[in-house]
Image: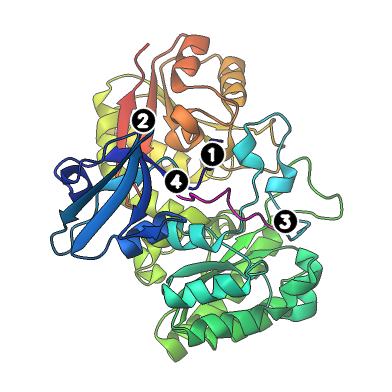
Amino acid sequence: MPAHDGAARVADVTKKSAGWRCGLRPGDRLLAINGQPLRDAIDVQIYGGEPRVVLDYEREGESKTCTVRRRYGEPLGISFCEDLFDGPPRVCRNRCTFCFVAQMAPGLRAPLYIKDDDYRLSFLHGNYITLTNLSPADWQRIEEQYLSPLYVSVHATEPDVRVNLMRNPRAGTILEDLQRLVDLGIELHTQAVLVPGLNDGAHLDRTLADLAALYPAVRDLSIVPVGLTQWHDPSLRPYHDAEAAEVLRLLNAWQARLLSDLGVRFVYPSDEWYLRGGVSVPAEEAYDGLLPAMVENGVGLVRRFLNGQARLLRDLANLGEDQTWITGELFAPVLRDVACSFVDQTALEVEVLPVTNRFFGATVTVAGLLTVEDVVGALKDRGTGGAIVLPGEIFRGPEGRSLDGYLPEDVARATDRKVYVIAQHGSSAHFTLSDVVL
């Protein structure tokens, strides 16, 4: 990770933008805007919003100043190597037994082990935070700069339950902290990771009632089952399929009640509850217009794929050759249904190959946490031919690499087969197919 030196290192400048007209270029170090020093990209947004903008920057050791008139609504057009200029992200001080980062395999790239709990990244990127490490100065800044919306990991609203889950005595003030943000006019999106026997059942009922009482400031609550790798705390276990179905029934009952009371369902189960419970995912209308914003939390991923599959399937049909579709074990039943219809319409042969996650352990069943080594191993074990179609979620690391550091080209070399990657654009239901060129 690059060293932080208190300056904003420019990564790119959009041509013809205000920043470009001011002379700023990639590699420059932006020092101040309108005389205000910059702590992070939020300050750039706030101080750069004036009609007249003065930029102080440094290029190859030489200090420069320029002034530009910004058109109404025009962004500065500057992106940065990092969003935080004054130091690394605030790290999480909790010791949650279910923390996924604490269960990571050894030997991966360093950023994967950072447990960020930084309210600034919550505002900028929708990262979920716990509110347990906010200082008086942080609260003041949230109020002064009106940093809304924020995304909060609640898990439970009962003080003793949340303290037990997070192993931090400061975790017990969650309702007071949420109310303070509500009083400031901050919009909040919340989540709860459920752990069998710890914060479900009656505890979940309490959490739902407490958070729904804060609607509409608390806009929604996503419910996610605990994810466990082979390095998890031995006292924990995942949900069984029958338990997942029971949780889903409870949440559906709450949705019906809240839809009547609030006009929205408010609580949204992640896809895993439906897939494990053997229940079809709901139509897009059941997400109350929130679907694009919640997909990073595992909510609505399947619905988004089903809504956006038509163009993708046309592209796959145009390949004109037999195919192997790679996926995680959780999504495989849905993809097999799609493949059956595809085969009937195209007469091509398609094998849906769910890959067992040997790297993290068999309890990890999502495609986004598959490694190339596991994918290649599964392909060699099957020994089938045709083109390989890979989900783009596997390659979300730096330079488009997988968790174990490989590129799609490495799959093509290892298997001596054509490889195609499905790319998803933003949070929309828009998928495209790209071929891998060696």
Quadrant position of residue 290: bottom left
Q: Is residue 12 magenta?
A: no
- Region in magenta: 83-92
Q: Disc 1 versus disc 4: distance between alpha carbons?
A: 38 Å
> Tag on residue 367?
1
Side of 338 where 318 appears, left or right: left
Q: How is the image coloured?
A: rainbow
Q: Position of residue 88 (x, y in %)?
A: 58, 48
Residue positioned 44% across, 34% down in the render: 391
Between marks 2 and 3 in the image, the one whose residue lies nearer the viewer: 2
Residue position marked by numbered label 2 in the rendering? 60
Q: Is residue 89 magenta?
A: yes
Q: Disc 2 versus disc 4: distance between alpha carbons?
A: 13 Å
Between marks 3 and 1 in the image, the one whose residue lies nearer the viewer: 1
Quadrant where the C terminus lies? top left
Q: Can residue 356 be seen?
A: yes
The numbered mark, 4 or 3, whose residue comes first in the sequence reads 4
Quadrant where the N terminus lies? top right
Q: Position of residue 27 (x, y in %)?
A: 35, 33
Between marks 2 and 4 in the image, the one whose residue lies nearer the viewer: 2
Are the residues tagged 1 and 4 within 8 Å (C-beta)? no
> Tag on residue 7?
4
The correct choice, above or below, for 6 with respect to 192 in the image is: above
Residue positioned 15% across, 45% down in the render: 21
| Viewer-nearest residue: 29 or 78 | 29
